[in-house]
Image: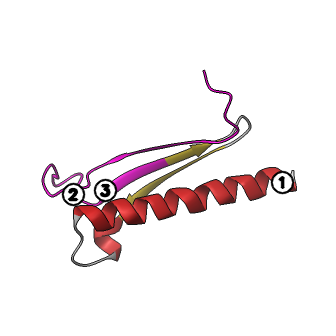
């Protein structure tokens, strides 16, 4: 149990190994949740960016997760 207002979770394949045909390196799932709402996204970073490495995948994932937290917070503020 957590008393946090908003939670986030991330899982995926940041590489350099571990990818497969179904889930290539750069496939990441991000979830952001409040008590009232949840946003879940599948990121296919390998389709959007060239020359991905582990550092870049982690940076892009963190940026996306933070944007999703802001999105959820803004939706909560509007309600």
Q: CA distance from mark 2 to mark 1?
A: 37 Å
Question: Helix or strand or loop: what does disc 1 sit on?
Answer: helix
Q: Would residue 61 appear left or right of 38 to someone viewing this image?
A: left
Residue at 41 percent across and 49 percent down: it is 29
Question: Helix or strand or loop: what does disc 2 sit on?
Answer: loop
| Image position of 40 with respect to 57: above or below | above
In the image, residue 4 lies in the stretch drawn in magenta: yes
Residue 39 percent location from the top left of the image: 59, 49
Name the quarter where the N terminus is drawn: top right
Which residue is tagged 3?
A: 27
In the image, residue 7 lies in the stretch drawn in magenta: yes
Residue at 79 percent across and 50 percent down: it is 76
Mark 2 crowdedness (10 Å alpha carbons): few <14, some 14-19, many ≥20:
some
Q: Would residue 48 appear left or right of 69 to someone viewing this image?
A: left
Residue 20 percent location from the top left of the image: 15, 52
User: Which range is magenta?
Assistant: 1-30
> How is the rendered protein coloured?
secondary structure
Name of the residue lying farthest toward the bottom: 50
Name of the residue lying farthest toward the left: 17
Residue at 19 percent across and 56 percent down: it is 15
Residue 71 percent location from the top left of the image: 67, 59
Residue at 34 percent across and 67 percent down: it is 45
- Pointers 3 and 2 in contact (CB under 8 A)? yes
Name of the residue lying farthest toward the top: 1
Question: Helix or strand or loop: what does disc 3 sit on?
Answer: strand
Which residue is tagged 1?
A: 77
Q: CA distance from mark 3 to mark 1?
A: 31 Å
Which residue is tagged 2?
A: 24
Mark 1 crowdedness (10 Å alpha carbons): few <14, some 14-19, many ≥20:
few
Q: Mark 2 against mark 1, which lies toward the viewer?
A: 1
Name of the residue lying farthest toward the right: 79
């Amino acid at each position: 149990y957590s008393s946090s207002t908003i939670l986030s979770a991330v899982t995926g394949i940041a590489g350099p190994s571990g990818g497969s045909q179904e889930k290539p390196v750069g496939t990441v799932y991000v979830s952001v949740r409040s008590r009232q709402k949840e946003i879940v996204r599948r990121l296919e970073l390998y389709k959007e960016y060239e020359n991905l490495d582990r550092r870049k995948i982690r940076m892009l994932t963190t940026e996306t997760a933070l944007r999703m937290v802001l999105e959820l917070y803004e939706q909560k503020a509007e309600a």
